[in-house]
């Protein structure tokens, strides 16, 4: 086994390829590339960079770092294009993977920073779990930004990595922390190349689950995860994410239930009901809530329905409702009241309820 800094020998394939798509990343690239150089991984390492039509000094910074990385024993492969417009994150990641050679893929965003032990610890996990996407805990920068989301990323229990896949938060291990084998990526992928506005990570994640893939998180903080207005994830419309989530809910969760209750008779619950196919709507036996005004009304009438008479769905107190439930209440926003109500029913997540919030 090689020591950190040992060069890749002639004809020797790297064991891990760090996949780095780049578009106008000059503000962050120095820190990002330095974190690649500082990995304590004892095996052979490759950095595969694909420049997606950057117009700033990104390529100058990458070329500056190439000899430093190569002197540290890291093979550097650089590709890209100079078209007037970028082709998008999905395309860039696919190209970076295609030009790389490692048996394992470590995904890195150009605005993030890896802790020195990231590749080593995730590689150890990936060897033991060859059909899994391996994630990790993160530290958000600036501190305090997206506090609820960051808690969700870091505190999901191992079983929740598979049961909370329908929420608005997206993949239960976030894309910038992904690590997997090349063989598994090839079995599932590639990424969707639709460009800006396409949630390529979410679509890949759903396909990964369809193929029987598992999800694992290394419970150490291995990535500095930046939040800023130019992040690619912010370009995806909420309505786009919603449509994909509903489709996957109907494909993955609802077929196992003959009927179910939507927990939330308010705006989000009614929106979910209206978004379902007619076949799925027929399975909804009730809404449930704690709001006495909604419960007192007694029912929700679906005015936009084509059916006659228009569907009338009962609205019940949650203690009068029966599982399974699709939960349309956002976690961590009610001072613990919703979570306590849910715990009081002694249900099993996945079997008796799923989160769609």
Image (cartoon, rainbow, N blue to C red):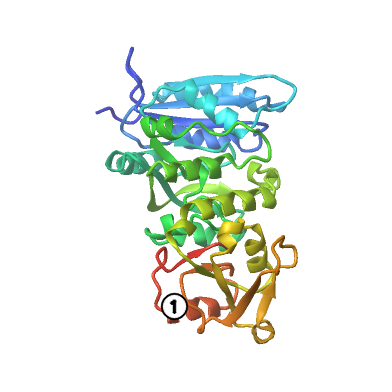
Q: Is residue 54 left or right of residue 70?
A: right
Indicate the quadrant containing the C terminus: top left, top right, bottom left or bottom right. Answer: bottom right
In this rendered view, identify the residue nearer to me: 191 or 253: 253
Q: Tell me where residue 76 appears, x and y as whole percent.
A: 47, 21
The image quadrant of residue 289 is bottom right
Q: Residue at x 59, y 62 (%)?
A: 281
**Up/down of 354 relative to 111, above or below:** below
Q: Is residue 196 left or right of residue 215?
A: right
Residue farthest to the front? 308
Give the class, few, some or many, for how many residues have Cα within 10 Å of label 1's Cα (few <14, many ≥20): few
Q: Is residue 37 left or right of residue 264?
A: left
Q: Residue at x 40, y 74 (%)?
A: 347
The image quadrant of residue 2 is top left
In this rendered view, identify the residue nearer to me: 71 or 238: 238
Q: Tell me where residue 44 appears, x and y as whole percent.
A: 34, 27
Residue farthest to the top? 10
Q: Residue at x 67, y 73 (%)?
A: 266
Q: Is residue 85 left or right of residue 203?
A: right
The image quadrant of residue 85 is top right
Q: Tell me where residue 26 appears, x and y as whole percent.
A: 65, 33
- The residue at which mark 1 appears reads as 343
**Up/down of 259 relative to 114, above or below:** below
What secondary structure is found at the residue carrying circle 1? helix
In this rendered view, identify the residue nearer to me: 93 or 223: 93
In this rendered view, identify the residue nearer to me: 126 or 266: 266
Indicate the quadrant containing the N terminus: top left, top right, bottom left or bottom right. Answer: top left
Q: Residue at x 37, y 58 (%)?
A: 158
Q: Tell me where residue 64 appears, x and y as whole percent.
A: 57, 23
């Amino acid at each position: 086994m090689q020591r950190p800094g040992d060069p890749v020998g002639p004809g020797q394939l790297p064991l891990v390829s760090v996949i780095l798509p780049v578009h106008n990343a000059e503000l962050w690239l120095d820190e990002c590339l330095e974190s690649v150089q500082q990995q304590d991984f004892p095996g052979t390492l490759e950095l595969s960079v694909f420049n997606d039509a950057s117009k700033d000094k990104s390529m100058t910074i990458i070329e500056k770092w190439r000899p430093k990385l190569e002197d540290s024993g890291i093979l550097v492969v650089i590709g890209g294009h100079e078209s007037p417009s970028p082709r998008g994150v999905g395309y860039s990641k696919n190209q970076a993977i295609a030009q790389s050679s490692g048996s394992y893929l470590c995904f890195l965003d150009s605005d993030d920073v890896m802790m020195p032990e990231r590749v080593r610890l995730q590689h150890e996990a990936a060897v033991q779990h060859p059909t899994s996407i391996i994630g990790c805990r993160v530290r958000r920068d600036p501190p305090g930004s997206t506090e609820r989301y960051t808690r969700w990323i870091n505190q999901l229990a191992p079983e929740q990595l598979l049961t909370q896949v329908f929420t608005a938060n997206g993949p239960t291990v976030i894309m910038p922390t992904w690590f997997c084998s090349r063989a598994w990526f090839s079995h599932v992928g590639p990424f969707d190349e639709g460009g800006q506005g396409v949630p390529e990570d979410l679509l890949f994640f759903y396909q990964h689950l369809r193929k029987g893939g598992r999800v694992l998180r290394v419970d150490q903080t291995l990535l500095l995860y930046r939040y800023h207005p130019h992040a690619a994830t912010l370009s995806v419309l909420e309505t786009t994410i919603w449509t994909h989530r509903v489709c996957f809910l109907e494909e993955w969760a609802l077929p196992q239930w003959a009927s179910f209750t939507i927990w939330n008779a308010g705006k989000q619950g009614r929106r979910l009901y209206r978004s379902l196919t007619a076949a799925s709507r027929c399975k909804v036996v009730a809404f449930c809530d704690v709001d006495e005004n909604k419960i007192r009304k007694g029912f929700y009438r679906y005015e936009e329905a084509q059916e006659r008479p228009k569907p009338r769905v009962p609205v019940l107190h949650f203690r009068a409702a029966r599982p399974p439930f699709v939960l349309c209440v956002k976690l961590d926003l009610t001072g613990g009241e919703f979570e306590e109500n849910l715990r009081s029913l002694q249900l099993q997540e996945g079997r008796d309820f799923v989160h769609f919030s």
